[in-house]
Image (cartoon, helix red, strand yellow):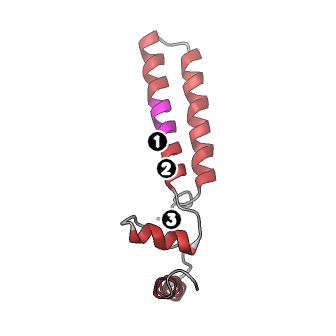
Amino acid sequence: MKHPHALNPSALRQRAAAHRAMALAALRANSSLSIRLKRYNDHMAKARTLEAKASATPPRNPRTALSWIKSGQSVRIDALNLPDHLRHVRALAVLEATGGEA
């Protein structure tokens, strides 16, 4: 299953904005106060989580990806097929071997 939003900070921010809007709508809903507050808090928690993911997503820059890998973070390589994936891996290996000057 492909998740197109996995490395797209813009999509994550749009989803967070949608959850903020749902949170405000929950406050105006025709429900009891406790239900409205629970729905508001749930949506705002999701929005905060999505915003954190959006700011933690590395840009699509090979040097940044290499520094993330060296710091122990995981990096997802979006490739069309195995040869394309291997091309990206080899490019990162060359970049590391040359000290980031490739």
Left or right? Give the position of 37 relative to 60: left
- Real-space CA distance between mark 1 and mark 2, rounded to the nearest whole angstrom: 6 Å
| Residue pointed to by mark 2 | 53
Q: Position of residue 50 (x, y in %)?
A: 50, 44
Left or right? Give the position of 80 relative to 46: right
Say what secondary structure mark 3 lies in.
loop
Give the amino acid type for the residue marked by disc 3 in the picture.
Lys
Quadrant placement of the C terminus: bottom right
Left or right? Give the position of 96 relative to 62: left
Which residue: 45% across, 25% down? 41
- Real-space CA distance between mark 3 and mark 1, rounded to the nearest whole angstrom: 20 Å
Q: Disc 2 vs disc 3: which is toward the camera? A: 2
Which residue: 59% across, 70% down? 61
Q: Position of residue 93 (x, y in %)?
A: 46, 86
Specify which label sits upstream in the sequence, 2 or 3.
3
| Residue pointed to by mark 1 | 49
How many numbered discs sit on the rendered protein?
A: 3
Is residue 75 something that shows in the picture?
no
Q: Position of residue 53 (x, y in %)?
A: 49, 50
- Where residue 69 is drawn, which disc sits there? none
- Quarter of the image holding residue 15? top right
Give the amino acid type for the residue marked by disc 1 in the picture.
Thr
| Residue pointed to by mark 3 | 2
Q: Which residues are magenta?
A: 42-48
